[in-house]
Image (spheres, rainbow, N blue to C red):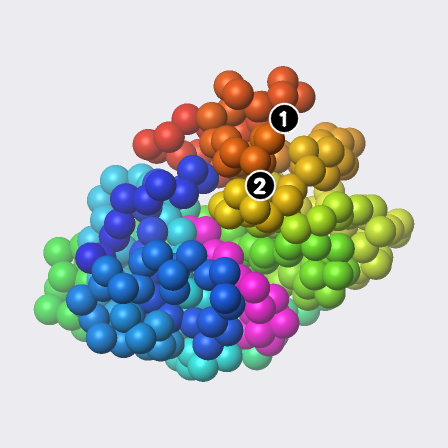
Amino acid sequence: MNLTRTKIRFLDLTCNAGGCGCSMRCAECWAMLKVAARMQCPKCRAFRVHEHPERIAAVLRRRKAAVIGWDFTGDMFDPERQFGAIDQRFAAMALTQHLTHVVLTKRPARMREYFLTRTPIDDSHRVQTSPQWYGVATNWLDEGCGGILGRAWDRCHAAMETVDSSLPLRNVWNGVTVRNQAEADAKIPELMQVPGNRWLSIEPLWGPVDLDCVTCIGDCDDDGAWLEQIGGVIVGCDNRRDVPCDPRWVHYIVDQCRAAEVPVFVKQLNLDGKIVTDPAKFPEYLRLRQLPWTLTTKGAETP
């Protein structure tokens, strides 16, 4: 398994370069409960943090445009993962400008640490020195067709010519998961210190979240103004039917996103104890499938 077709409705493919594994081991983790046992890799079955570099090579060989989610059966920014392994992921993203890369973490503090130490930026959001991933990508190119790039060398070389290493990668979206107000208050300020495109996953939604109450961050003049600097928001209920998610909580998030003119994607709802994924069965106001990126295999609105 290198690149995988996914049922995740806002992605085309996933690249789980870290296999199945996360040090957090949340009791409700779907990857640990539903996916790990099916894997052939012993470390995946044990849900340990490790690496599958051959899956990064599969991304580099991908010719057709696609939206690829990274490490959705783990966490790219797990504290047990070395920054050098993360450098390889971003090098692959830089060399595949025809692909859109989506990153999601529950650990935005470590994401912020990575960018501040591996790609230090100044107040104008320009990288002060060559980022570590740039060196990895350059080394791969220097290896020629006999290295990891293989027959993709020409395409990757042409892509690298278009990359400005002093700016965040334009084909990468860095996101964070928040599930309730406490997590929103703690994690969104960390996300807002990460350069480049940002997005927010409020799924599973475990309680009402008032985005306007999140503390003002960075260049924002007013509380809640940070939302206008988010590319998109995905919201949905827990996959477990017995975990409540009042549709009014989702409605309130949609209201805030619309007021800030931010794309919003309603993934699924808990309606009368049933998990509903078909937007045609949602209340009309919540039939929204807007994304800041363009899917190639699934229907979604792109504002």
What is the x, y in percent for residue 73?
38, 60
Residue at the location (50% across, 73% down)? 24
Which contiguous range is marked in magenta?
Answer: 101-114
Residue holding disc 2: 236
Q: Residues within 10 Å of mark 1 (few under 14, many from 20)?
A: many
Residue at the location (63% across, 18% down)? 284
Determine whether, in the image, residue 138 is placed left or right of residue 120: left
The answer to whether residue 301 is visible is: no
What is the x, y in percent for residue 125?
65, 61
What is the x, y in percent for residue 99?
36, 46
Residue at the location (45% across, 51% down)? 102
Residue at the location (51% across, 24% down)? 279
Determine whether, in the image, residue 168 is placed left or right of residue 179: left
The image quarter containing residue 31 is bottom left
Q: Earlier in the sequence, mark 1 or mark 2?
A: 2
| Quarter of the figure with the N terminus | bottom left
Query: Looking at this view, is 256 or 260 the one in front?
Result: 256
What is the x, y in percent for residue 120?
59, 73
Determine whether, in the image, residue 180 is placed left or right of residue 113: right
Residue holding disc 1: 286
Query: Looking at this view, is 284 or 57 the one in front?
Result: 284
Task: Tell me the SS state at disc 1.
Answer: helix
Query: Which amino acid is tagged 2?
Result: Gly
Q: Residue furthest right?
A: 222
Work out whether 102 lies above or below 217: above
Task: Tell me the SS state at disc 2.
Answer: loop
Work out whether 125 lies above or below 147: above
